Image (cartoon, rainbow, N blue to C red):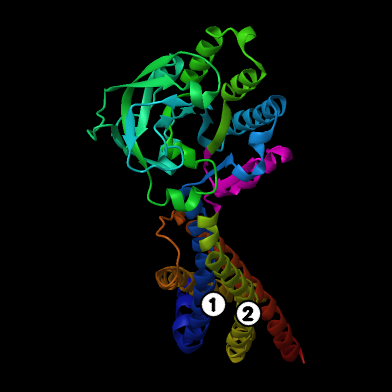
C-alpha cells in the first residue's frame, strides 16, 4: 500500500481524533487571524485618517504679544526669522502646499460701504493683505470664493493691481460691486500721518467671505484680518511702498511724520500656513521654529481634529496587540496539548506498526504528513474565517465610535500574515509531532526489547 493511501486511511480510521486536531488548529489560528487583522485595520485606520485629514499647520499674529510696539529694527529681526522658517518648511518633501500673508500698514480712503463693519470697517477705509504665492491654501482653510478667480503667479510676478474684495462691500449707494469693476484706493493723509498724494486703481477679480466657523476659531488671532482686508499680490504692496518712498521728500518730514512713514511702510508677515502629507510631521515643523517667535505668533493646526479620534484608535491598538500576544502563547500551549493527546490516543496503533517491522523514520514521516495535511486544511479555513470575523468586529467598532469614514488598503499585509501563519504553524505542528513521536516510539522500542 502506498504511503499516501496509508495516510488517508489513517485519517479516516481516526476521524474523531483528526477532527479534534482540526478543530484545535482552526480555532486557534482563526483567533490569531482575527487579532492580527484587527491590529492591521487599526493601524490602517490611523494611517488613512492621517492622510485624509486636512493636515495644516501655521503661525499667525498673537495680537496681545506687543509686536506692534517693537521698533523697526526688532520688527525686521522678527520678519527675517519668520521668512527663514517659512522657506525652510515649504522646501521639505512632506510640505504639500504653503502660503504666507503679509499685511500692509498703509490706510486707504475708499468710496465704498460695508454692511459688516467688522475690525477694519468701522470707518470707510481699507487695508491690504498680500498673498506671497499663487496657492489657494488660505482660501481652502479660511475663506470661501463666491465669484471670480484667485490671484495667479502672473499677477504676483507682474505686481498687478488686482484685488479680491470681501463680499459685504458695496458702492456707497448700495449697488453691488461686480467682477471687473475698477476700485480707487486713495492714500489717507489723516490716517497715515504724513503728506502724500496717491490714488491706486485696482481691478476686482474676486469676491469672498469668511467661512462659517472662521470668526469662532480665529477671532483671537491675526488671520482674522484676512477676512476683512482687500487681498492683493504681495508684490503689489511692495510696489506701492516703493512708489510712496520715491515720491516723498523725506528731508521735508518732521520727526513725527518720519516715524509714521517708517511704521506704515513696514509690511509684516501676518501668518504662514502649510499643508503637510501627515499629522506626524507637525512636531518636525514646530522644531524648526525659532523659540523667540513663539512670543509673537500663535500656532494654528488641524492636530485637534486628529486628537479627537486618537484615543479610540489607541484603545483598539492596545486591545488587538494584547490579545494577539496572549493568543500566540495560548495557541502554542493548546496545540501542543492537543497534539500530545492526539498521539497518545494512537499509542496502540504506533506499537502495532513497530511490531510489524515498520521503521521509526517511516512512522514519523507518515504521522507528520498526516498532521500537516490536517493542519494545512484547517489553517486555510481559519484564515478565511478569521478575516471575516475581524471585519465584522471592526465594522461594529467603527459604527459605534466617533471615527470618521476611511478607506483602507491592507490586503497585501493580510496576505503576508496568512503565508507567514501557514508556514510557522505547519513548522510548529511538525516539530511538536516529531518530538512527541520520538518520545513515544522510544518508549515502545524499550518495551518490545524487554
Q: Position of residue 90 (x, y in %)?
A: 57, 32
Secondary structure of the residue carrying tag 2 is helix
**Outermost residue toward the left in this view:** 175
Residue lying at 50% horizontally and 67% vertically, measured from the top left? 38
Q: Is residue 275 visible?
A: yes
Residue 412 vs 151, above or below: the answer is below
Instruction: Give percent across and percent down for residue 231.
Output: 42, 29
Q: Which residue is mark 1?
A: 28
Can residue 132 be seen in the rendering of this structure? no
**Residue depicted at x 43% and y 30%:** 126
Image side of residue 291 versus residue 21, left or right? right
Residue 424 colored magenta? no
Q: Which mark is residue 439?
A: none
- Span of residues in magenta: 274-303
Q: Residues within 10 Å of mark 2 (few under 14, many from 20)?
A: few
Which residue is more in the foreground, 330 or 304? 304
Looking at the picture, how far across and down is residue 232, in whole percent?
A: 42, 25
Check if mark 2's residue and mark 1's residue have beta carbons within 8 Å: yes
The correct choice, above or below, for 38 with respect to 169 in the image is below
Q: From the viewer's perspective, tell me whether residue 246 is left or right of residue 186.
A: right
**Front position in the image: 155 or 3:** 155
Residue tagged 2:
330
Amino acid at each position: 500500500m502506498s504511503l499516501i493511501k496509508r495516510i488517508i486511511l489513517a485519517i479516516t480510521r481516526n476521524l474523531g481524533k483528526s477532527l479534534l486536531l482540526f478543530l484545535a488548529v482552526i480555532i486557534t489560528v482563526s483567533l490569531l487571524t482575527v487579532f492580527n487583522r484587527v491590529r492591521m485595520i487599526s493601524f490602517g485606520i490611523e494611517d488613512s485618517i492621517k492622510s485624509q485629514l486636512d493636515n495644516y499647520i501655521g503661525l499667525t499674529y498673537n495680537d496681545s504679544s506687543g509686536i506692534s510696539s517693537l521698533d523697526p529694527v526688532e520688527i525686521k529681526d522678527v520678519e527675517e526669522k519668520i521668512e527663514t522658517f517659512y522657506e525652510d518648511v515649504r522646501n521639505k518633501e512632506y510640505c504639500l502646499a504653503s502660503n504666507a500673508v503679509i499685511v500692509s500698514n498703509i490706510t486707504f480712503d475708499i468710496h465704498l460701504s460695508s454692511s459688516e463693519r467688522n475690525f477694519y470697517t468701522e470707518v470707510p477705509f481699507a487695508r491690504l493683505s498680500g498673498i506671497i504665492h499663487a496657492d489657494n491654501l488660505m482660501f481652502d482653510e479660511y475663506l470661501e470664493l463666491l465669484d471670480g478667480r484667485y490671484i495667479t503667479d502672473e499677477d504676483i510676478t507682474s505686481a498687478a493691481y488686482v484685488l479680491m474684495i470681501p463680499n459685504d462691500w458695496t458702492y456707497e449707494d448700495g449697488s453691488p460691486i461686480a467682477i471687473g469693476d475698477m476700485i480707487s484706493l486713495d492714500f489717507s493723509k489723516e490716517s497715515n500721518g504724513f503728506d502724500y498724494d496717491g490714488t491706486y486703481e485696482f481691478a476686482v477679480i474676486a469676491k469672498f467671505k469668511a467661512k462659517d466657523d472662521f470668526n469662532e476659531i480665529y477671532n483671537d488671532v491675526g488671520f482674522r484680518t484676512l477676512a476683512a482686508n482687500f487681498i492683493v499680490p504681495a508684490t503689489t504692496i511692495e510696489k506701492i511702498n516703493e512708489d510712496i518712498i520715491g515720491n516723498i521728500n523725506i528731508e521735508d518730514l518732521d520727526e513725527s511724520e518720519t516715524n509714521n512713514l517708517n511704521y506704515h511702510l513696514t509690511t509684516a508677515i501676518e501668518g504662514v500656513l502649510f499643508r503637510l502629507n501627515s499629522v506626524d510631521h507637525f512636531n518636525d515643523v514646530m522644531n524648526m521654529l525659532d523659540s523667540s517667535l513663539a512670543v509673537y505668533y500663535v500656532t494654528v493646526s488641524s492636530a485637534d481634529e486628529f486628537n479627537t479620534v486618537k484615543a479610540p484608535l489607541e484603545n483598539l491598538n492596545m486591545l488587538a496587540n494584547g490579545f494577539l500576544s496572549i493568543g500566540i502563547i495560548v495557541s502554542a500551549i493548546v496545540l501542543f496539548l492537543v497534539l500530545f493527546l492526539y498521539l497518545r490516543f494512537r499509542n496502540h496503533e504506533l506499537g502495532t506498526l513497530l511490531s510489524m517491522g515498520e521503521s521509526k523514520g517511516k512512522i514519523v514521516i507518515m504521522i507528520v504528513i498526516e498532521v500537516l495535511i490536517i493542519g494545512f486544511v484547517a489553517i486555510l479555513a481559519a484564515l478565511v474565517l478569521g478575516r471575516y470575523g475581524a471585519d465584522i468586529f471592526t465594522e461594529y467598532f467603527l459604527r459605534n465610535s466617533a471615527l470618521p469614514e476611511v478607506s483602507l488598503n491592507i490586503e497585501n499585509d493580510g496576505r503576508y500574515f496568512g503565508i507567514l501563519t501557514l508556514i510557522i504553524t505547519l513548522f510548529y505542528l511538525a516539530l511538536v509531532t516529531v518530538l512527541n513521536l520520538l518520545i513515544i516510539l522510544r518508549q515502545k522500542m524499550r518495551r518490545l526489547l524487554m
